[in-house]
Image: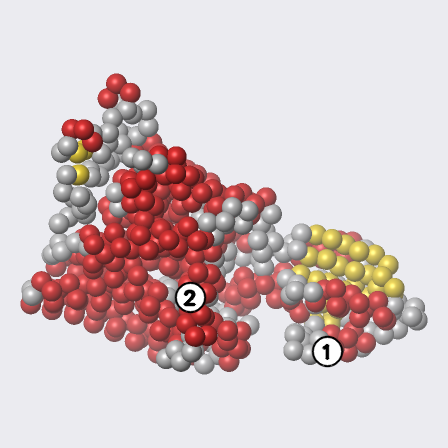
Amino acid sequence: MSPATDGPQHLTRRLLPFGEPLVVVSSNPSERIEGSKGKRWITVGSAIVVLVFLGIALRAIPLIQNRCLWIDEAMLALNLVERTPRQLLEPLDWNQGAPAGFLLVTKAAIAVFGTSEWALRLFPFTGSLLGLMGFIWLSRRLLPEKAALLAIALFAISPPLISYSAECKQYATDAALTVGILAVSLGLLYREGGLRRWGVLGAVGAIAVWFSHPVVFVLGATGTALFADSLAMRDRRRVLECAATIGCWLASFGLCYVATLRHLGTNQYLLDYWAGHFFSLPPTSLGDISWLVSHLFNFIEFPGGLGGTDVKAAGLAAALFLVGLFAILRERWPMAIAIVAPAFLAILASGLHKYPFAGRLLLFMVPLLILVVARGAWALVEALRPSLPVASVVVVGILLLAPAVETYQQIRRPLRYEQLTLALEDVRQQWQPGDKVYLYYGAVPAYTFYTRDRSFILGEVIKGTEYRGHRTGYRDELRTLAGEPRVWVIFSHRHQAEESLLRAYAESLGECRQEIHQPGATAFLFDFSVSQ
């Protein structure tokens, strides 16, 4: 059974090129879908073109907003600008971890275009656009036409995919490579053969492990699905071709692990940072099961992007995921394994304390989530439309409205918006000889990056230390500046209420003379020579 003919026996789905009318051809004349006078005013091609431009425009907005590097980007960028390409293969400073291929391509980009924000973000942005194009190709061949259009729309407006499309981090390319692996393996998953297909899949997978850490879960799932299907077919040659492809992946991953990854798994800071997101393996209590359920549901909200902020749709998306998974499983079980098994492998890695199951680290699974949810939505709409057409419209409307509203809010007020350079420039303009600076620890990476070529000021800068476990440490650091008449206390990337806490400590030492506020960054001028 080919992907173009899956579904009920009386219904045939055609994959249409751009510009051809959106038509579902049925062997039952009473079920033939036609528009006014036999023509539709919208075509598959025109709808996709609109979604392509929408997806590109939404991803371009964060790039052209010219945001300062936020803390995680700044820490990775410092490694990129201060190290040689060879040194990037060694354990990174600032407790950072990124795939070797990602680092080397980004290093090449800044060597050509300079160390501007957009140059540092160019590779993830390009990967995001390629992921969008690949997802369109994939969804049109994997899903029924209307489900494919819904999936493309959800992908185009996905808040996390847009948010991470223009950041100097690898998460957007993780998602793009998931799309790429599934697209390259699609023909094989539908039992098409050929040495060329196996060779391309083997080469793509072997290269991908150098550009993405979680792509190994996608390859593991795809390899499992293909190998199981080859055994089910009892095709000895196909089994050997599949085994050779998987062997190629394993050899490349083994080399990558020895060269770069083995150091990352022993970073105690990262293990402590993600401590709450490692699954207990094996689960021994209801609490462990509850952890798993909550983390899976949280994934749908973030980074799945289907939870919404003002419009809540996580529960609906979860239900549609189950419906869609059942539909895909019934139509082609190897495809269902390839789509769902990455989550199981990621949970297994989490149980082994090798990969946290949380947040942006799961962005690579978002394309898979969208495919299944769109398939489930289409199945539900088909079931509701004959008797409850309004309900079917409401289902699709809520599913699209939730991410659309969140994306609109993020465009108006971007996440991770830390304009430290604007605050520093304001301080520079009012600088006086003898001024001192206390830099909140969250601002240190960005400050270090933006002042690496020229000194910010000639005076003393105290770079704060993180004291989340015993916050009186902040007070002790500020006390070293007691008696100083002009002390600038500068913040960005504030953690919870730490800015208020530090201000309270500073006000116990003197008076606040001036406040400077910029998006995501603040500066306060204190007089510590005034006794309280």
Say whether residue 472 is left or right of residue 287.
right
Say whether residue 93 is left or right of residue 123.
right
Residue 125 percent location from the top left of the image: 44, 51
Local crowd size for mark 1, using a 10 Å CA cut-off: few (<14), some (14–19), many (≥20): some
Nearest to viewer (mark 1 / mark 2) = 2
Going from N to C along the chain, the mark reached first, 1 or 2, is 2
Residue ID at (42%, 39%): 394
Q: Secondary structure at mark 2?
A: helix
Residue 79 numbered tag: none
Q: CA distance from mark 1 to mark 2?
A: 38 Å
Residue ID at (35%, 73%): 348
**Residue 480 versus residue 239 in the image, above or below:** below
Q: What amino acid is at disc 1?
A: Gly
For mark 1, what is the residue?
473
Residue 51 percent location from the top left of the image: 39, 38
**Residue 206 versus residue 68 in the image, above or below:** below
Local crowd size for mark 2, using a 10 Å CA cut-off: few (<14), some (14–19), many (≥20): few
Q: Secondary structure at mark 1?
A: helix
Residue 13 percent location from the top left of the image: 20, 39
Front residue of this view, candidates 301 and 274: 301
Camera sees residue 448: no
Identity of the residue furthest to the top in this view: 37
Residue 488 percent location from the top left of the image: 79, 63
The quadrant of the picture occupied by the C terminus is bottom right
Residue ID at (47%, 57%): 302
* Residue 236, quarter of the rendered image: bottom left
Front residue of this view, candidates 115 and 13: 13
Q: What amino acid is at disc 2?
A: Val
Residue ID at (13%, 49%): 1
For mark 2, what is the residue?
293
* Residue 431, quarter of the rendered image: bottom right
